[in-house]
Image (tube, helix red, strand yellow):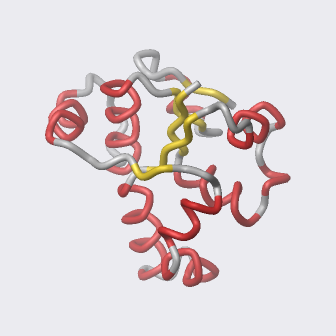
Amino acid sequence: MRLLLDTHVFLWALAEPRKLSSKARNAITKLENSVYVSPMTAYELSYKHHQGKLPSGAAIVASFGRQVAHLYASELAISAPHALAAGQLEWEHKDPFDRILAAQAMVEGLTLVTADQQLHAFEPVTTLW
Protein backbone atom coordinates (compact mmCIF):
# COMPACT_ATOMS: atom_id res chain seq x y z
CA MET A 1 0.00 0.00 0.00
CA ARG A 2 1.20 3.54 -0.79
CA LEU A 3 0.22 6.10 1.85
CA LEU A 4 0.29 9.88 2.05
CA LEU A 5 0.06 11.26 5.59
CA ASP A 6 -2.18 14.21 6.37
CA THR A 7 -0.45 16.81 8.54
CA HIS A 8 -2.20 15.87 11.79
CA VAL A 9 -1.42 12.19 11.14
CA PHE A 10 2.26 13.03 10.66
CA LEU A 11 2.26 14.91 13.97
CA TRP A 12 0.38 12.20 15.83
CA ALA A 13 2.59 9.43 14.42
CA LEU A 14 5.60 11.26 15.84
CA ALA A 15 4.31 12.69 19.11
CA GLU A 16 1.00 11.07 20.05
CA PRO A 17 0.62 7.70 18.28
CA ARG A 18 -2.28 6.76 20.58
CA LYS A 19 -4.39 9.36 18.73
CA LEU A 20 -4.07 7.33 15.53
CA SER A 21 -6.67 4.71 14.76
CA SER A 22 -5.27 1.19 15.05
CA LYS A 23 -5.80 0.75 11.30
CA ALA A 24 -3.80 3.92 10.54
CA ARG A 25 -1.04 3.08 13.03
CA ASN A 26 -0.68 -0.45 11.62
CA ALA A 27 -0.56 0.79 8.03
CA ILE A 28 2.05 3.46 8.78
CA THR A 29 4.34 1.07 10.66
CA LYS A 30 4.02 -1.87 8.25
CA LEU A 31 7.41 -1.94 6.53
CA GLU A 32 6.08 -3.23 3.21
CA ASN A 33 3.93 -0.08 2.84
CA SER A 34 5.42 3.02 1.24
CA VAL A 35 4.77 6.11 3.35
CA TYR A 36 5.02 9.65 1.97
CA VAL A 37 4.94 13.11 3.50
CA SER A 38 4.27 16.20 1.41
CA PRO A 39 6.27 19.44 1.58
CA MET A 40 2.82 20.98 2.07
CA THR A 41 2.89 19.36 5.51
CA ALA A 42 6.18 21.13 6.25
CA TYR A 43 4.65 24.40 5.11
CA GLU A 44 1.48 23.89 7.17
CA LEU A 45 3.45 23.01 10.31
CA SER A 46 5.83 25.92 9.89
CA TYR A 47 3.02 28.36 9.12
CA LYS A 48 0.86 27.29 12.05
CA HIS A 49 3.85 27.34 14.40
CA HIS A 50 4.76 30.85 13.23
CA GLN A 51 1.14 31.96 13.76
CA GLY A 52 1.23 30.63 17.34
CA LYS A 53 -1.32 27.90 16.60
CA LEU A 54 1.21 25.12 17.11
CA PRO A 55 3.46 26.23 19.96
CA SER A 56 4.84 22.74 20.54
CA GLY A 57 5.86 22.38 16.89
CA ALA A 58 9.27 24.07 17.01
CA ALA A 59 11.27 20.86 17.32
CA ILE A 60 9.40 19.12 14.51
CA VAL A 61 9.70 22.15 12.23
CA ALA A 62 13.45 22.43 12.97
CA SER A 63 14.06 18.75 12.24
CA PHE A 64 11.41 18.02 9.61
CA GLY A 65 13.63 15.86 7.39
CA ARG A 66 14.81 13.76 10.32
CA GLN A 67 11.21 13.34 11.48
CA VAL A 68 10.17 12.09 8.04
CA ALA A 69 13.07 9.62 8.11
CA HIS A 70 12.11 8.53 11.65
CA LEU A 71 8.82 7.25 10.20
CA TYR A 72 10.68 5.48 7.37
CA ALA A 73 8.79 7.80 5.06
CA SER A 74 9.83 9.68 1.93
CA GLU A 75 9.09 13.21 0.88
CA LEU A 76 6.70 13.45 -2.06
CA ALA A 77 7.62 16.59 -4.01
CA ILE A 78 4.83 18.86 -5.18
CA SER A 79 4.76 18.94 -8.97
CA ALA A 80 2.95 21.09 -11.52
CA PRO A 81 0.39 18.29 -12.15
CA HIS A 82 -0.37 18.27 -8.40
CA ALA A 83 -0.81 22.04 -8.30
CA LEU A 84 -2.95 22.09 -11.44
CA ALA A 85 -5.15 19.27 -10.13
CA ALA A 86 -5.57 21.06 -6.77
CA GLY A 87 -6.72 24.20 -8.54
CA GLN A 88 -9.27 22.30 -10.61
CA LEU A 89 -10.83 20.15 -7.86
CA GLU A 90 -14.62 20.20 -7.89
CA TRP A 91 -14.67 20.61 -4.13
CA GLU A 92 -15.92 23.49 -2.04
CA HIS A 93 -13.20 22.95 0.56
CA LYS A 94 -11.01 26.06 0.50
CA ASP A 95 -8.09 24.89 2.70
CA PRO A 96 -5.04 25.02 0.39
CA PHE A 97 -3.18 22.47 2.50
CA ASP A 98 -5.95 19.88 2.13
CA ARG A 99 -6.43 20.68 -1.56
CA ILE A 100 -2.78 19.94 -2.36
CA LEU A 101 -2.75 16.76 -0.29
CA ALA A 102 -5.96 15.56 -1.97
CA ALA A 103 -4.54 16.35 -5.41
CA GLN A 104 -1.26 14.59 -4.65
CA ALA A 105 -3.11 11.50 -3.48
CA MET A 106 -5.30 11.49 -6.59
CA VAL A 107 -2.53 12.13 -9.13
CA GLU A 108 -0.14 9.61 -7.56
CA GLY A 109 -2.74 6.95 -6.72
CA LEU A 110 -1.98 7.16 -3.00
CA THR A 111 -4.20 6.47 -0.03
CA LEU A 112 -4.49 9.54 2.18
CA VAL A 113 -4.24 8.69 5.87
CA THR A 114 -6.47 11.18 7.67
CA ALA A 115 -9.04 11.58 10.41
CA ASP A 116 -10.54 14.57 8.55
CA GLN A 117 -14.17 13.83 7.70
CA GLN A 118 -14.18 16.37 4.84
CA LEU A 119 -11.41 14.42 3.14
CA HIS A 120 -13.20 11.11 3.76
CA ALA A 121 -16.32 12.55 2.14
CA PHE A 122 -14.41 13.69 -0.97
CA GLU A 123 -14.92 10.58 -3.09
CA PRO A 124 -12.17 11.02 -5.67
CA VAL A 125 -9.64 10.54 -2.82
CA THR A 126 -9.02 7.13 -1.30
CA THR A 127 -8.64 7.53 2.46
CA LEU A 128 -7.75 5.35 5.40
CA TRP A 129 -8.47 5.86 9.05
Q: Is residue 109 left or right of residue 127?
A: left
- The quarter holding residue 66 reads bottom right
At x 42%, y 63%, the residue is: 44
At x 42%, y 82%, the residue is: 50
Query: In the rendered view, would you say 67 is above or below 85?
Result: below
- The quarter holding residue 93 reads top left
Percent x, y of residue 58: 55, 83
Q: Is residue 119 left or right of residue 86?
A: right
Outermost residue on the top side: it is 123
Residue 73 or residue 91, whichever sits in front: 73
Outermost residue on the front side: it is 32
Residue 88 or residue 79, whichever sits in front: 79
Query: In the rendered view, would you say 32 is above or below 122?
Result: below
Query: In the rendered view, would you say 22 is above or below 8?
Result: above
Q: Quadrant of the N terminus?
A: top right
At x 63%, y 50%, the residue is: 9
Percent x, y of residue 51: 43, 79
**Image label count:** 0
At x 70%, y 57%, the residue is: 12
Q: Quadrant of the C terminus?
A: top right
Percent x, y of residue 53: 53, 75
Percent x, y of residue 125: 45, 22
